[in-house]
Image (cartoon, rainbow, N blue to C red):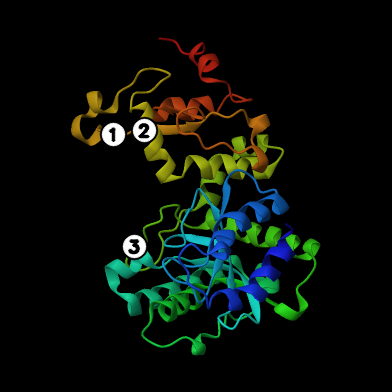
Amino acid sequence: MALRESLEKILFEYPLVSNDNFKGHLFASYVRNVVPKSISASLELPEIYSIKASAGNGSWAKVPWIAIFNKLVTESVMSGFYCVYLFRADFCGVYLSLNQGIADKRDQFGLGVSRDILRGQAKLFKDKLGSDKLREFSDPLDLKLDSIPKATTSRRLGLAYEAGNIASKFYSRESLPDDKELVGDVGKMLEIYFSLFEEVSLKEEADSDLLKEVSLNEAAENNQAERVWFEDTTKYRLHRVTERNQTLSRKVKQLQGCICKACGFDFESRYGEIGRGYIEADHNVPISNLSGAKMKLDPLNDFTVLCSNCHSMIHRIKPTPTLEEFRQNLKM
């Protein structure tokens, strides 16, 4: 099923079936299981992306969604930021939105303050991305929540989506674009998503104000020689941000330990308590294979752990060698 057909089916049929009992309903199962697979087939996304959809949890959602997650950022609408189709409560249309999760902030600050934080982050993110990049995705996000009773979970969720909106484009139910335009818009939104990913911290837990910034531009300047060697700048970007993913880095350390696999250096043995648990994760997928479509994220097989010196030195060799090739250069 094509992208347009999936959206259209939800827009026209959801208002009817949502009057039925939710438990075990085939349409809820269709949204949750069939829609993500169908849209994934239409978009042919790189492996770093996953798609999930929801018609509700225990009862029909007033604002069902279909989300596209960059797995280096988040795999849940509860935290981080993500691309998402949000259906209006009156089902007169659907938005393609770059949005933010609220749950991690809500638990710490309460709902009202959390929405204020989301609005502040959204403004910061918009300023960072710039008006030119967001020109095609500047529609205000209005989910028509007046039809949902106040003081209900559905209403609160809808308000959180509106507060967390960074960029969005509206599609009317009566004039949905064809698949070519819809797929093209998703591609543009994913580019914005990736640009934002480069600009902010990769950790999912927000600080009390805004996400901590990580300057990849500064990192690139400090590694100019390496950057120049990458003929495909997308490969360079993927390489840098993958190694900076803190969640993935933790998984690599848990599975592979904290002793350098090149020289055997152990930070804890050398520095004591302050060195415990410290090591750097190196993404060892061959650069020739490093593209959006072939991006690998297996923390056991696609990474190795290196001390800071070995990690720096291995990237001074062009092309970057395998671990075994690098070991041959070491003077032990």
Q: Any mark on residue 95, and which?
A: none
Q: Residues within 10 Å of mark 2 (few under 14, many from 20)?
A: many
Q: Which residue is mark 2?
A: 253
Q: Amino acid at mark 2?
A: Lys
Please tell me whether residue 240 is drawn above or below residue 206 in the rendered image: above
Q: Which residue is mark 1?
A: 277
Quadrant showing the C terminus: top left
Expressed as whole percent of the image width and height from the top left, the position of residue 148 reads 47, 86
Observer-nearest residue: 214 or 282? 282
Which badge, 3 or 2, is on the more N-terminal residue?
3
- Determine if residue 169 is in view: no
- Measuring 47% from the left and 67% from the top, which residue is drawn there? 56
- Measuring 80% from the left and 61% from the top, which residue is drawn there? 180
- Measuring 37% from the left and 61% from the top, which residue is drawn there? 206
Please tell me whether residue 42 is drawn above or below residue 278 in the rendered image: below
Expressed as whole percent of the image width and height from the top left, the position of residue 70 reads 54, 52
Labels 1 & 2 near each other (Cβ < 8 A): yes
Q: CA distance from mark 3 to mark 2?
A: 24 Å
- Quadrant of the rendered structure where residue 193 is? bottom right
Expressed as whole percent of the image width and height from the top left, the position of residue 194 reads 59, 55
- Quadrant of the rendered structure where residue 84 is? bottom right
Q: Any mark on residue 207, and which?
A: 3
Q: CA distance from mark 1 to mark 2?
A: 8 Å
Observer-nearest residue: 229 or 6? 6
Labels 3 & 1 near each other (Cβ < 8 A): no
- Quadrant of the rendered structure where residue 331 is? top left
Q: Is residue 241 left or right of residue 208?
A: right
Observer-nearest residue: 71 or 52? 52
Q: Amino acid at mark 3?
A: Asp
Q: Nearer the viewer, mark 1 or mark 2?
A: 2
Which badge, 3 or 1, is on the more N-terminal residue?
3
